[in-house]
Image (tube, helix red, strand yellow):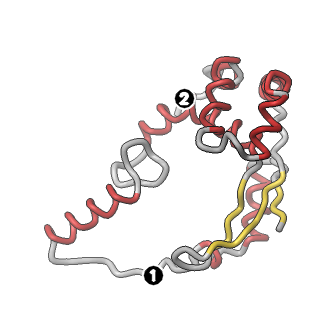
C-alpha cells in the first residue's frame, strides 16, 4: 500500500468527519452517548480534526460486556467518539484496503458478510469432494492477551483500554 499521500489530511477533512458522525450515529440517534456527542458536535469534530492533524489521536476507553447469542462471547465496544474516528478512517482508507483483500474475505466488507460467506462455503462444498474441518470455538480466548497487548504497544503505541 502506498504511503504518504496525505491520508491524515483527507481523514481530517470537515466533510469526512461530518459523514463519519452520521454513519456512526445511524440507527443510534437516541442513545445517550450519541445525544451527548451531537450536543457539542462542532467542538467534538474540531477537536478530532486537531488530533488527527497533529498525529496524536487519543484512543478512548472501551467497555467490556458479555453476550450469549448463540454462544458466550466477550465484546469490547469502543466509545462513540472512537466509532466516529473509525468511520472517518474507513471512509478514506477502505477503497485502498479493499484492493488488497483476498476474494474470500467476508467480514466487514461492502457487499459481503455472513450470508455471502455461507453461500460461498456451500458452493465450494458441493463442487469439491474434500473439506476442511476445524474448530475455532473461543479462538480469541486462546490468544495470550498480555503478549498480544505488548506486541501491539510495541508496534502501535496507542492507549486503548478495556474495562468491565
Q: Depth check: 133 or 32 in front?
A: 32
Instruction: From this view, report whether residue 60 is shown above or below residue 4.
Output: below
Q: Which mark is residue 135?
A: 1
Q: Which mark is residue 76?
A: none
Residue at image location 83% in from the left, 53% down from the top? 61
Q: Would residue 51 be seen by someone viewing this image from the given angle?
A: no
Q: Position of residue 18 (x, y in %)?
A: 67, 24
Q: Quadrant of residue 104?
A: bottom left
Crowding at label 2, few (<14), some or many (≥20) Cα neighbours within 10 Å?
Answer: few
Circle 1 sits in a helix, a strand or a loop, which is it?
A: loop
Callouts 2 and 1 close, C-beta under 8 Å: no
Q: Depth check: 22 or 95 in front?
A: 22
Crowding at label 1, few (<14), some or many (≥20) Cα neighbours within 10 Å?
Answer: few
Disc 2 versus disc 1: nearer the observer: 1
Q: Is residue 86 left or right of residue 32?
A: left
Q: Is residue 75 left or right of residue 113?
A: right
Residue at image location 67% in from the left, 65% down from the top? 75
Instruction: From this view, report whether residue 58 is shown above or below residue 77.
Output: above
Q: Depth check: 70 or 131 in front?
A: 70
Q: CA–CA distance between discs 2 and 1? A: 36 Å
Q: Quadrant of residue 20?
A: top right
Residue at image location 60% in from the left, 35% down from the top? 23
Instruction: From this view, report whether residue 150 is shown above or below residue 13.
Output: below
Identify the residue under disc 2. Answer: 2
Q: Depth check: 18 or 92 in front?
A: 18
Q: Position of residue 4 (x, y in %)?
A: 64, 24
Q: Position of residue 39 (x, y in %)?
A: 82, 30
Q: Would residue 93 be seen by someone viewing this image from the given angle?
A: yes
Q: Is residue 140 left or right of residue 38?
A: left
Amino acid at each position: 500500500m502506498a504511503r504518504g499521500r496525505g491520508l491524515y489530511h483527507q481523514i481530517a477533512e470537515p466533510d469526512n468527519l461530518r459523514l463519519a458522525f452520521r454513519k456512526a450515529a445511524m440507527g443510534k440517534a437516541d442513545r445517550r452517548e450519541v445525544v451527548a456527542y451531537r450536543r457539542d458536535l462542532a467542538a467534538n469534530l474540531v477537536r478530532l480534526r486537531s488530533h488527527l492533524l497533529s498525529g496524536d489521536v487519543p484512543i478512548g476507553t472501551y467497555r467490556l460486556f458479555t453476550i450469549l447469542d448463540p454462544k458466550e462471547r466477550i465484546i469490547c465496544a469502543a466509545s462513540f467518539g472512537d466509532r466516529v474516528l473509525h468511520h472517518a478512517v474507513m471512509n478514506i482508507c477502505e477503497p485502498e484496503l479493499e484492493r488488497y483483500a483476498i476474494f474470500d474475505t467476508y467480514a466487514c466488507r461492502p457487499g459481503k458478510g455472513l450470508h455471502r460467506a455461507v453461500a460461498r462455503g456451500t458452493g465450494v462444498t458441493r463442487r469439491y469432494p474434500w473439506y476442511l474441518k476445524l474448530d475455532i470455538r473461543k479462538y480469541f480466548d486462546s490468544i495470550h492477551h498480555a503478549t498480544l497487548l505488548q506486541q501491539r504497544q510495541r508496534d502501535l503505541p496507542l492507549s486503548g483500554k478495556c474495562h468491565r
